[in-house]
């Protein structure tokens, strides 16, 4: 597989955590790789706490406001953490970098992957940005979705 190698993933996470990751590198793929590392290493509860804080702090360091219409998005973050738990469990103890590589090569890496579960209006709503909302199209982790 390709990006990220174990060293690249660890470096990406270090730069995320230390808020030295440039805005230009804080891509959708980087979000997913960082999320995978956190869920793999820390489990879902601690990962969610650290991702909430880390994304907000990184946004602040980039001058990206965390508001009703920009920055941190609670439902997207929490939904991906839930999906990552199942995705990593299916990888049967593989290292974090392997899981990140597999995720980035999977349909879950598509920018619109959550639209399988959420209508666009609900997912992009202020409510969903500020707090967790349940999917309105299909439950998360439903094999039929």
Image (cartoon, helix red, strand yellow):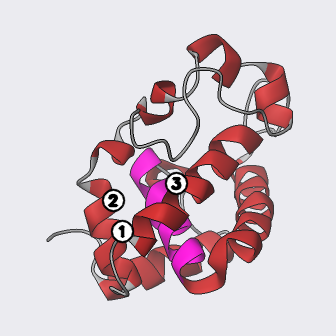
Judged left or right of residue 2, residue 88 is right
Residue 101 seen in the current view: yes
Q: Disc 3 to disc 1, how far (Cα)?
A: 13 Å
Image height of 135 relative to 106, above or below: above
**Circle nearer the viewer, 2 or 3:** 3
Q: Which residues are magenta?
A: 28-40
Query: Answer yes or no: do the residues labelled 2 and 1 have beta carbons within 8 Å?
Result: yes
Tell me if label 3 and label 1 are in contact, CB under 8 Å.
no
- The residue indicated by pointer 3 is 83
**Residue 100: mark in rendering:** 1
Residue 124 appears anywhere in the view: no
Q: Residue at x 49, y 68 (%)?
A: 36
Q: Residue 138 appears at what percent x and percent y?
A: 54, 28
Relative to 14, is 104 on the left or the right? left
Give the vertical position of 21 relative to 113 (above or below): below
At 80% across and 67% down in the image, what residue appears?
Answer: 49
**Does residue 2 appear left or right of residue 122 in this picture?**
left
Residue wearing tag 2: 103
Work out whether residue 70 or residue 130 is closer to the camera in this orientation and state it. 130
Find the distance from the CA under tag 2 to the CA under tag 1: 5 Å
- Residue 41 position, x and y percent, is 57, 85
Q: For the residue carrying disc 3, how many other residues have a C-alpha within 10 Å: few (<14), some (14-19), or many (20+)?
A: some
**Label 2, label 3: how many angstroms apart (C-alpha)?**
10 Å
Q: Position of residue 39 (x, y in %)?
A: 58, 73
Magenta stretch: helix, strand or loop mostly = helix
Q: Secondary structure at mark 3?
A: helix
37 magenta-colored: yes
Mark toward the start of the polypeptide (3 vs 1): 3
Helix, strand or loop under label 1: helix
């Amino acid at each position: 597989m390709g990006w990220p190698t174990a060293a690249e993933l660890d470096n990406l996470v270090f730069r995320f955590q230390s808020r030295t990751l440039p805005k230009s590198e804080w891509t959708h793929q980087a979000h997913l790789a960082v999320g995978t590392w956190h869920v793999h290493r820390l489990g879902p509860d601690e990962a969610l706490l650290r991702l909430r804080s880390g994304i907000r702090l990184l946004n602040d360091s980039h001058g990206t406001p965390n508001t009703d219409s920009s920055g941190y998005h609670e439902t997207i973050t929490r939904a991906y953490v839930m999906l990552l738990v199942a995705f990593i469990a299916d990888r049967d103890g593989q290292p974090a970098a392997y899981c990140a590589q597999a995720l980035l090569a999977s349909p879950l890496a598509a920018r619109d992957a959550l639209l399988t579960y959420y209508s666009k209006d609900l997912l992009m709503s202020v409510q969903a940005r500020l707090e967790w909302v349940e999917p309105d199209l299909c439950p998360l982790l439903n094999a039929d979705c």
